[in-house]
Image (tube, helix red, strand yellow):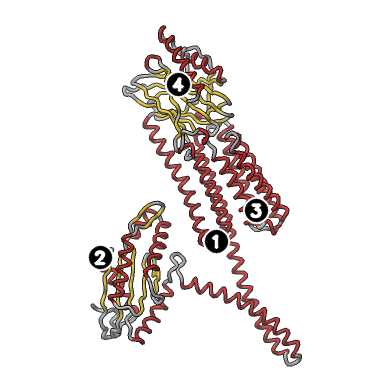
């Protein structure tokens, strides 16, 4: 409690002693709110704005029944506060036969430096209750009322500037319900945008594109900004340090604006396209960079106002860049300008609808903030997606042109061979030129074919070989085994209860589980000749040349035990995962084909599943007498 409040409390204690000596005087008529309703918007209060010198007398006059404040009506509980000390008076009535608690909540603002509730307790003693910071962008105080008790309360709010916020009164059930709803919105909004941000980080690690990294950094700053605005901020973690209230908001907005400018430079390649325009963007970046250290030494509400103005003009500047580039026929320029216009309109909605105009939207700030931040994230992710779409399109066009050039070069070469009879020297010179062009085109084509061949045999998610390559490899290894009279083992692996992972945690968790298991499978294979395949879904297959049944069973069992010991980690959750394995070995049995070996391993896997899972079973092949018989009999 501040020094002024301490002094005020001591003075009023003495004044209350004098009031208690005489008969209690009724207070003037003030708005009343009953706890019989779950919640009520405080749309009408006795209201006064005073200075610190006038505060003691104003509080004493109120509790003495001599206040002559004005009645203020607000739409849907959205009250406008003035710079200085704002006093609001109203009465809370417990009209039930049981003791109840009243919860008074106020949407938090960085410009609010102090909020307290004063009322007369037992023996006419002045009681002061400070508001506490909640995790859902709300300030809250709890007031306990006896049965049939009516309490006149005085809300004291100190504001650094003009602001608008919603004031609500809940009973206990209403407060619990509203807290659950607010926490659900908070988790849904922040959790969803964090997942999108994390997905961009994984995408960057996969493709190593700087535009993806910049977009990841921008969305991370936006996520942290939204978290700070919604209450999960430094002041919430360290409420004893009032100087931390809202300090991160202007810093995060400035950093996100810098990253957005760098993202624009990368997407449109401004330095190569228009160096003068690139210089303008660099100046704006330096402006925000200079703002960062300065903001640490100025009041937070001034920092917020300054950075919002700077950010707004920057959005207008970026929209103008987009329109200029559109005139130069840049493909993504018009879409980029539209996104900047949407961002600017969103900011106006936040500033005007929730802070200036009395249209009852202050209490919906959380929903408005989450919606606007989600729209911003999706739109910028969409523009990045369109950029990669165009890049893939350009690559396909380049491949077609390379093939066309190869055909043209080949035709030209034939023409040069015909002309060689007429002029050998001229012909040789032209042949060399055309041959060089052909080699370049063929080299480009070869690189494309190598990349296509690599993608044709690998599974994109796990990095293991795919089913198509398995069909080729098993036939080759079968023939080699038959030719060299060596054993050939096959291990089929399946994740136990994999459907539960997808159903309970989502397909992203399932994909990460498959990648995690694939890493363990790669580690267990020690020989270059051993190959691992993703056969389909959550089913994997190992081809082990020159490996007898004992060795294959030992390898499969070692892999199964290793998986059972290590839990799969997903978003700080430890998920136990087990596998079942089926082993089958070909040792030159008569009539056995590659499909019989896989059918045997699959049958052993089914036996392991049916026997309780998390185990390895083996199927032994016998000779097949006739070609009509399609499976080995144990």
Residue placed under numbered mark 1 in the picture:
208
N-term-proximal mark, 2 vs 1 = 1
Q: CA distance from mark 2 to mark 4?
A: 70 Å
Q: Would you call the spot at circle 2 few (<14 residues within 10 Å), some (14-19), or many (20 or more)?
A: few
N-term-proximal mark, 1 vs 4 = 4
Q: CA distance from mark 3 to mark 4?
A: 56 Å
Residue placed under numbered mark 3 in the picture:
334
Residue placed under numbered mark 4 in the picture:
118
Task: Tell whether label 4 touches label 3 (CB within 8 Å).
Answer: no
- Helix, strand or loop for disc 3: helix
What count of labels does the image hold? 4
The vertical placement of 391 against 356, above or below, is: below
Q: CA distance from mark 2 to mark 1?
A: 45 Å
Q: Would you call the spot at circle 4 few (<14 residues within 10 Å), some (14-19), or many (20 or more)?
A: some
Give the side of residue 320 with respect to residue 112, left or right.
right
Q: Quadrant location of the C terminus? A: bottom left
Q: Quadrant of residue 560?
A: bottom left
Task: Tell whether label 4 touches label 1 (CB within 8 Å).
Answer: no
Comparing marks 3 and 2, which lies closer to the viewer? 2
Give the side of residue 118 with respect to residue 348, left or right.
left
Comparing marks 2 and 1, which lies closer to the viewer? 1
- Helix, strand or loop for disc 1: loop
């Amino acid at each position: 409690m501040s020094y002024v409040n301490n002094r005020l409390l001591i003075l009023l204690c003495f004044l209350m002693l004098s009031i208690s000596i005489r008969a209690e005087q009724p207070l003037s008529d003030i708005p009343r709110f009953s706890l019989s309703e779950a919640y009520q918007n405080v749309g009408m209060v006795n209201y006064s704005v005073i200075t610190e010198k006038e505060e003691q007398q104003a509080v004493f006059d109120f509790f003495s029944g001599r206040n002559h404040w004005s009645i203020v009506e607000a739409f849907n509980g959205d009250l406008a506060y003035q710079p200085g000390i704002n006093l609001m008076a109203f009465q809370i009535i417990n009209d039930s036969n049981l003791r109840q608690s009243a919860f008074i909540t106020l949407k938090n603002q960085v410009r609010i430096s102090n909020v307290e509730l004063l009322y007369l307790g037992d023996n006419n003693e002045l009681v002061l209750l400070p508001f506490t910071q909640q995790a859902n962008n709300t300030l809250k105080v709890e007031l306990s009322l006896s049965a049939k008790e009516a309490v006149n309360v005085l809300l004291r709010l100190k504001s650094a500037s003009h602001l608008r916020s919603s004031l609500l009164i809940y009973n206990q059930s209403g407060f619990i319900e509203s807290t659950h709803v607010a926490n659900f919105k908070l988790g849904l909004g922040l959790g969803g945008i964090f997942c999108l941000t994390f997905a961009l980080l994984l995408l960057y690690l996969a493709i190593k594109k700087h535009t993806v990294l910049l977009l990841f950094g921008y969305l991370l700053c936006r996520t942290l900004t939204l978290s700070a605005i919604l209450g999960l901020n430094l002041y919430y973690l360290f409420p004893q340090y009032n100087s931390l209230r809202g300090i991160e908001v202007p810093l995060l907005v400035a950093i996100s604006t810098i990253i957005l400018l760098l993202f624009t430079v990368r997407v449109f390649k401004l330095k190569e396209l228009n160096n003068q325009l690139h210089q303008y963007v660099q100046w704006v970046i330096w402006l925000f960079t200079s703002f960062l250290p300065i903001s640490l030494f100025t009041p937070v509400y001034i920092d917020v106002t300054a950075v919002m103005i700077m950010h707004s003009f920057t959005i207008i500047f970026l929209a103008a860049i987009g329109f200029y580039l559109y005139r130069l026929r840049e493909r993504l320029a018009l879409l980029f300008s539209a996104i900047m216009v949407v961002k600017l309109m969103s900011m106006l909605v936040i500033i005007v609808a929730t802070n200036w105009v009395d249209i009852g939207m202050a209490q919906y700030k959380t929903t408005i903030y989450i919606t606007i931040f989600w729209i911003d994230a999706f739109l910028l992710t969409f523009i990045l997606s369109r950029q990669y779409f165009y890049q893939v399109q350009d690559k396909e066009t380049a491949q077609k042109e390379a093939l066309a050039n190869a055909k043209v070069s080949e035709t030209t070469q034939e023409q040069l061979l015909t002309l060689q009879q007429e002029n050998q020297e001229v012909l040789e010179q032209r042949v060399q030129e055309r041959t060089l062009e052909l080699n370049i085109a063929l080299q480009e084509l070869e690189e494309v074919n190598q990349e296509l061949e690599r993608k044709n045999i690998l599974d994109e998610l796990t990095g293991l070989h795919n089913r198509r390559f398995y069909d080729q490899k098993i036939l080759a290894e079968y023939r080699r085994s038959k030719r060299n009279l060596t054993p050939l083992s096959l291990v089929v692996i399946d994740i136990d209860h994999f459907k539960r992972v997808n159903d309970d945690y989502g397909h992203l968790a399932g994909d990460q589980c498959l990648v995690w298991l694939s890493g363990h499978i790669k580690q267990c294979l020690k020989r270059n000749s051993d190959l691992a395949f993703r056969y389909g879904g959550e089913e994997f297959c190992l081809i082990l040349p020159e490996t007898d049944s004992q060795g294959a069973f030992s390898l499969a069992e070692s892999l199964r035990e290793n998986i059972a010991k290590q839990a799969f980690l997903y978003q700080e959750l430890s998920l136990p995962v087990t596998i079942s394995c089926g082993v089958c070995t070909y040792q030159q049995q008569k009539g056995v084909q590659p499909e019989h070996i896989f059918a045997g391993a699959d049958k052993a896997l089914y036996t392991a599943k049916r026997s309780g899972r998390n185990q390895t079973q083996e199927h032994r092949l016998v000779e097949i007498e006739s070609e009509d018989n399609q499976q080995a009999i144990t």
